[in-house]
Image (cartoon, helix red, strand yellow):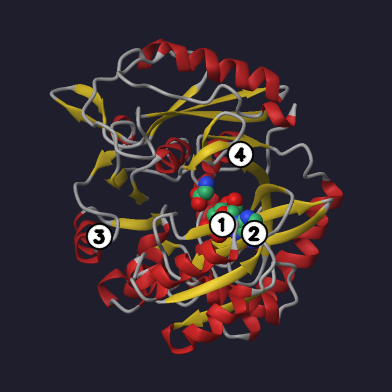
Amino acid sequence: MNILLLGSGGREHALAWKIKQSAHCDKLFVAPGNAGTQTLATNLAFNDDDFEAIKMACLKYEIELVVVGPETPLVKGIVDFFEHDAALSKCAIIGPNKIAAQLEGSKDFSKHLMQQCHIPTAKYATFTKANFNAGIDYLKTHPLPIVLKADGLAAGKGVLICTSNQEAIDEFTAMLQDHKFGEASAKVVVEEFLEGIELSVFVVTDGISYKMLPSAKDYKRIGEGDTGLNTGGMGAVSPVPFADSTFLKKVETQIVAPLLSGLKQNNILYKGFLFVGLMNSNGEPSVIEFNCRLGDPETEVLVPRLKTDMVEIFMAIAHSKVNELEIEILDETAVTVFLVSGGYPDTYQKGLVIKGLNQVKESMVFHAGTTTINQETVTHGGRVIALTSLGNSIQEAVTKSLASAHLITYEGKYFRNDIGKDLI
Ligand code: AMP
Ligand code: GLY
């Protein structure tokens, strides 16, 4: 079958690489893709949330399967768009519909559902302009630190951790009164701070059955030792050693199963991948967030460990056969080290020539922010290249990724040398 993959990051290059290995894949298209996906597939030059352009491409290229990488098209309702268009009735699309995608698209929706399903998560309250003064009173006596979250999508920037009550009041005011995150902060969730170590667990579901995918840990801060500004992710490790079978059983019985039955009780059909962002507090899991898609860079460590045909996973979701799906995972550990642009996550230059990509032999090279200009691969985003290696230990895998990181060059290249070190 012909397949269209939406997105342009390292996650999408890793997915494209895996999809191309499937016997079920004839032609693969990626929109908009990057310089890496271009070597495996045909890149199409439109945005991943341009529904009309996506429809036209599906008809023109006789696409039978659309895979949605990022959250924006899902939260905007691309699945509903496909379901309501007769011309697209033969085209399966992988991901939750608009209501189900609210699990990521609205923090308030997600917290409310967790409360209803008795899922362990931080205590919270939600405020809008209408109860602004009550919010200020709530913040005056809230224990520190205080977590403020813009309700809607805010490009990963909508969470603030405030260390004084006054800072929380100022930020809360900026979010609600001054539209700090635009429409996304028209509602603000105020949350208790959770202590512990973060990790994520992934689930595949057709809304009826589910299967657990491996755990992964990403490294969000720009600096070594988890310091400095938050980024989209500087690296990842899978599996996570401290997420042993006892912990993962708790995640399944206390979080995944109650969530999926809660969705069903609310007549919400959730199909696709579920990203469960967790805090491990002394062996007890609590939910930090749900995302309605796979993670980036977590996909770059998950997909290389997957023995199962990726397209068979998509078809099981589309045809409600997840109960029959056998997910096979390599025992090896995968470690991704991300090469980023100098200056990221603040401003950075684009268009810098990348050399040495062909020198890498011991790692998989997944492109993220890259493009091709005059037949040269150049930087085109903050996160540039994800280098994933497999090994019998974190140490072995990370050593390979770091060696590969030195082979690739561009002006201002930066990466963290300590990915996975806290877990060794
Ligand atoms: P989110 O967008 O909800 O994933 O939040 C972004 C980051 O903020 C998370 O990855 C955590 O590092 C941090 N965070 C969010 N909520 C909490 C919380 N309740 N307690 C501690 N840290 C949090
Ligand atoms: N790595 C975090 C995310 O994909 O949201």
Is there a contact, CB below 8 Å, between mark 2 and mark 4? no
Specify the amino acid type for callout 3.
Ile
Label 2 near ligand 1 (CB < 8 Å): yes
Task: State whether residue 206 is above or below residue 241.
Answer: below
Q: Please say if the residues under marks 1 and 2 sit with CB atoms less than 8 Å apart.
A: yes
Say which of 274 and 237 sits in front: 237
Can you give x and y, in whole percent of width and height, for residue 263 in the image? 62, 78
Per the image, label 1 sits on a secondary structure element best described as strand
- In this rendering, would 353 be left or right of 185? left
Q: CA distance from mark 2 to mark 4?
A: 39 Å
Provide the secondary structure element on which disc 3 rests.
helix
| Residue farthest toward the left in the current orientation of the protein | 374
- Which residue lies under the disc numbered 3? 54
Left or right placement of residue 279 versus residue 377 in this view:
right
25 and 199: which is toward the camera: 199
Q: Is residue 269 visible?
A: no
Give the class, few, some or many, for how many residues have Cα within 10 Å of label 3's Cα (few <14, many ≥20): many
Report, in whole angstroms, how far the alpha carbon at label 4 lies from the one at label 3: 28 Å
Task: First in sequence, mark 3 or 2: give its number.
Answer: 3
The picture places residue 295, in percent across and down from the top left corner, at: 52, 49
Amino acid carrying label 2: it is Pro
Which residue is disc 4 drawn over? 306
Residue 145 shows which numbered tag? Answer: 2
Residue 129 in picture, x, y percent from top left = 42, 84
Reading the image, the residue beneath label 1 is 161
Q: Is mark 1 within 8 Å of ligand 1?
A: yes
Q: Residue at x 47, y 17 (%)?
A: 405
State which tag comes first along the sequence, 1 or 3: 3
Q: CA distance from mark 1 to mark 3?
A: 38 Å
- Relative to 394, does residue 258 appear above or below in the rendering? below
Where residue 85 sits, quadrant-wise, is: bottom left
